[in-house]
Image: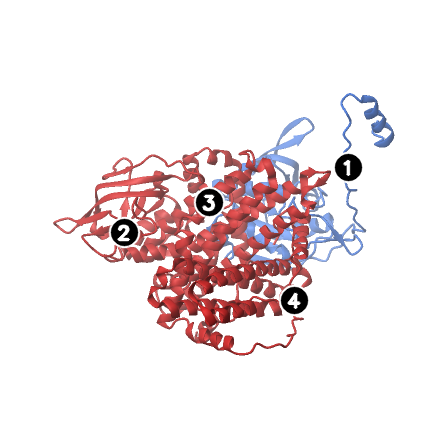
Amino acid sequence: MKILVCISNVPDTTSKINFTEGDTKFDTNGVQFVINPNDEFGLTRAMWFKEKQGATVHVANVGGTATEPTIRKALAIGADEAIRVNAEPIDGFYVAQQLAEVVKNGGYDLVIAGRESLDYNGGMVPGMIATLLDMNFVNTCTGLEVDGDTVTATREIDGGKEKISTSLPLVIGGQKGLVQESDLRIPNMRGIMMARKKALTVIEPIAVTAATTDVSFDKPAAKGAVKLIDADNIDELINLLHNEAKAI
Amino acid sequence: MADKEKDILRGGQFIVKETNCEDVFTPEDFSEEQTMMKEAVMEFNDREIIPYKARFEAKDYALTEETMRKAGALGFLGVAVPEAYDGLGMGFVSTVLTCDYISSGTGSFSTAFGAHTGIGTLPITLYGTEEQKKKYVPQLATGEWFGAYCLTEPGAGSDANSGKTTATLSEDGKSYRINGQKMWISNAGFCRLMIVFARIENDKNITGFIVEYEGDNPNGITLGEEEHKLGIRASSTRQVFFNDTVVPADNMLAGRGEGFKIAMNALNVGRIKLAAACLDSQRRILTTAVNYANERKQFKTPIADFGAIKTKLAEMAANAYAGESATYRAAKNIEDRIEMRVAAGNTHQEAELKGVEEYAIECSILKVAVSEDVQHCADEGIQIFGGMGFSEETPMEAAWRDARIARIYEGTNEINRMLSVGMLVKKAMKGHVDLLGPAQAVQDELMGIPSFETPDYSELFSEEKEMIKKLKKTFLMVAGGAVQKYGQNLEEHQQLLIAAADILIEIYMAESAILRTEKNAKRFGEDKQSVQIAMAKLYLYHAVDIIEEKGKESIISFAEGDEQRMMLMGLKRFTKYTNYPDIVDLRVEIAEKVKAENKYCF
């Protein structure tokens, strides 16, 4: 089984988010980037398939050279090879088209992408890849077993879980549940040393257009001060909720 | 090769030579691979150590052992071990950074890690025969076995060569019988191998042995109860008793009587690693303290907004920054020296030994400076937390207790202070560092008329670099005068040696902070380094004060009359700024940055 894990390079959750150029560009200054958590759950599951079922695991990312440390981390964790599509990701559709090209040329049986990335939360890419390549698709996937070409996937649905039987080739939009947080791997030192010896192929993007472009960004308004109301003063609480916060 | 040698300052030479900022290595020079290692180690600390802090504090020794095994599985124990013995054979900087970032969770783990990878493993990789290395090092590198280092005895602490443990050769000459008592042995409770120092007959120097230890087959070895300690509570620390313990003669390390040398050289490496191990604690303490200071309100104001707290945040940051700067500067010097020797045909073993030995002075300096910084940092951390800081509920209390040991082990700070100056004087006598020429030049300068011109200090750090030169003159004046006065008997004047060491230490630390910042300001821009510039200036300001005080007490102790007056005037000249920095402003700038980022962010 040949697996492609799509890796998005996203700001660490503790990063301070700022914008530049009149709030039209994300300010990467001082921002620590990591593997998108949903992708990391997928990568860890892929490593399980590699170790238990002899799968080959490649990772792919659409991004500039600045994303290479994140890609190398995936290699240090154990992916066999990496591909970087040398283009700034403009929108989900653009990224999906680039990744679909990688999948088509690489002959992958299973494509694992995170169900959404932590930065823009578009949640589009895995579905689009499946559509572009006419592959089966399971979104919000929390469990994945493969036996030959037969796949049993678990999917999160409102208030419960759904178990699905499908077949390869398949694209999943994965998330926590594929593995647990405690299963996530710290790259070991040998892995880190091996990472630089593994292939990281840089390919040029195909000529496609994005469907959307960012116009501007707004940050949420800063939280105001908290007002403490005496427990006995319910009338005042109601008054403030009604007239000031306009919550009731 | 010759050019390379010229560029690398020899150990101790910093005191007489100027270093170009381009020639120092800084944490900003970490390679992508080193950054990834750092992040992996930090993740390990965050996931495997910090969440279990309470268990470590409750003396859960088994947890320390289990965590060490996990560290072994991730390759953290083999970073410094050559690849031929199942290690990763990474450079010295990578070794130091692993020690640095793995150490802030708890001193218990940090001690176990340091004792195993440093003094528990290194004596074999540095002095072992090929057979010994093949037999023992792979198990140590992977964490299958843990090592302990048995040097200290009830009557032999700082005077390590005075141990009473004996090793007696059997009649057939095939084995030694070891008898004696060792104490304060880190990792004793879970080690499988001990490096034991014992005396053969009436030898002047002790001898090192590799001793295997299996609980099921104790071979005359018994362990005392776990010691109950102020800090590093889950570090297994026990006495070890040897009663006719039979050790194959082949397990002797290096030669007979070489033990003291092994012990000292293993400690040299241990010292810089210990300094590194005190760095991330400072970062974490400062981050925790600023988190609290930003949240905690008194008088309707976050306490981080008060000048009293800003002072603390700024000083803590500046000290940690200087510690990082000096530690990685020395680490890279050692790495370069090792590579240079390997390229010149030395075995890796010889190269590493000589490389570290070369910078023994810097290792001692770092051990003292950074261990005292972490103590101070933890102390201020408690103060920022106020009453809460005194409670076991907050992390400051344990950090403070854990920091305390760093001033004691790997050679007390008093011993290391005296060693640093003692080694420098010895190097001068051997001609490795020319102290006499520069000291004479300072003497001549003292006799001359000082320049009254106002220098142009408009360029970044021009005054600070001039100040560093003057501080070096102060050291040469004090040390030179003391050597002239006391000659071979200098070592009997411990107060003087310690004061001279303080001068030496402050110079190295302040210079390192300035060089790092200058290098980064040149490549990243002065505007991006403004806070770092403030930290380097703040550190230097305090260094100048300390040096003035220590210089004064030294000069008064050994010089009299006109000579004393002349030296005190020189001291005044050498510690005078043309433009005094406004350290109140500097502290505010540093503290505002730390507050805004809500962490140590450099």
Q: What residue sits right under mark 1 in the picture?
A: A225
The amino acid sitting under disc 3 is Arg
- Specify the quadrant of the image occupied by residue A3: top right
Q: Secondary structure at mark 2?
A: helix
For this rendering, which residue is in front, B24 or B285?
B285
Q: Which disc number belongs to residue B579?
A: 4
Question: Residue drawn at (65%, 60%), measured in percent from left and top?
Answer: B529
Quick check: do tags 1 and 2 share a chain? Answer: no
Q: Disc 2 marks which amino acid?
A: Ser
Write down the chain letter for disc 3: B
What percent of the width, then of the height, locates residue A226? Answer: 76, 34
Q: Nearer the viewer, mark 1 or mark 2?
A: 2
Where is residue B359 shown, x and y percent of the image?
Answer: 42, 63
User: Which quadrant holds residue B246?
Assistant: top left
Quadrant of the image containing the N terminus of chain B: bottom left
- Element carrying mark 4: loop
Q: CA distance from mark 4 to mark 3?
A: 37 Å
Q: Nearer the viewer, residue B211 or B360?
A: B360
Left-right relation of B496 to A80: left
Distance from the alpha carbon under mark 3 to that under mark 1: 41 Å
Chain A appears in which tint?
Answer: blue
Please, is residue B361 above or below residue B274 in the view?
A: below
Q: Residue furthest front?
A: B561
| 4 or 2: tag closer to the N-terminus | 2
Measure the alpha-carbon separation of dots 3 and 2: 26 Å
Which sits in the foreground, B7 or B545?
Answer: B545
From the image, state whether disc 1 or disc 4 is nearer to you.
4
Chain letter for mark 2, please.
B
What's the CA distance linking mark 1 and mark 2? 66 Å
Residue at mark 1 to residue at mark 4: CA–CA distance: 44 Å
Figure quadrant of the C terminus of chain B: bottom right
Q: Which residue is mark 3?
A: B404
